[in-house]
Image (tube, rainbow, N blue to C red):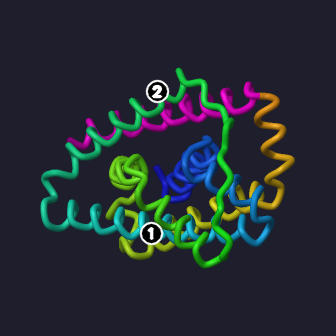
Amino acid sequence: MSYAENLWLFTLLLAGIIVVPGMDMIFVVANGLTGGRRAGMAATSGIMLGGAFHTLFGTVAVTALSTLVPQLAGPMLVIGAAYMIWIGYTLAKSAIVIDGIEASHLNRTTRIFAQGLITCLLNPKAWLFILAVYPQFMRPEYGPFWRQALLMGALTLLLQALIYGGLALAAAKGRDALISKPQITIWIGRAAGWLLMAVAAMMLVEGWSGW
């Protein structure tokens, strides 16, 4: 697989995961609804900073695997791919909807930003997902890890800004549409699950062959 193909797969997978309604999306929608554009964008910015921390964590983990304990790289690829398949399976069977979003009473932009960061950092699934995904896409043959991390981190921030930022700017209309038509979010979640399983299956085969 070429580096360009690797990046396309990573971007596709990342976009599929970000659009699945979860803690981060609910936080952005709630603040966009109750505090307006500034509050929604502050929430988005905090979550984006959390995404940057996740990228740093994933880079350190992959670097440690490849340099300190290289014999673990193969098993980690297999374990990570299997975990991704499990996440995809649960999403494909899920019925995720956005409903009952509680209003945020944060008034200051800085407080909303800080809470967005904390919301992102305290999401255990995000850390596990990073540990599963980054070893699949960050490889020594693609060049220095720091350069790969910069590009993957930039893609993460860009997609978060486009998806969460766009949702924050149209929070009221977007929330009404998603709540009145729950099938939309259900099928978004299921489609992301099938996408995740397909990519993970490819990585599982590659990791198993390398191991």
- Mark toward the start of the polypeptide (1 vs 2): 2
Residue 141 position within the rendered picture, expressed as x and y whole percent measured from the top left: 35, 63
Is 208 situated left or right of 191 in this image? left
Residue at the spot 61% in from the left edge and 69% down from the top edge: 112
Is 190 situated left or right of 29 in this image? left
In this rendering, the answer to whether 174 lies above or below 95 is: below
Q: Nearer the viewer, residue 205 or 55?
A: 55
Residue 2 position within the rendered picture, expressed as x and y whole percent measured from the top left: 49, 54
**Residue 35 quadrant:** bottom right
- Amino acid tagged 2: Thr
Q: Quadrant of the C terminus?
A: top left
Q: Dot 1 surroundings within 10 Å: few (below 14), some, or many (20 or more)?
A: some
Q: For marks 1 and 2, give the CA distance.
A: 29 Å
- Amino acid tagged 1: Gln
Question: Of tags 1 and 2, which is closer to the observer?
Answer: 2
Part of the protein shown in magenta: 182-211
Is 168 situated left or right of 113 in this image? right
Q: Dot 2 surroundings within 10 Å: few (below 14), some, or many (20 or more)?
A: some
Pointers 1 and 2 in contact (C-beta within 8 Å): no
Per the rendering, the mark at residue 90 is 2
Residue 183 is covered by the magenta coloring: yes
Per the rendering, the mark at residue 148 is 1
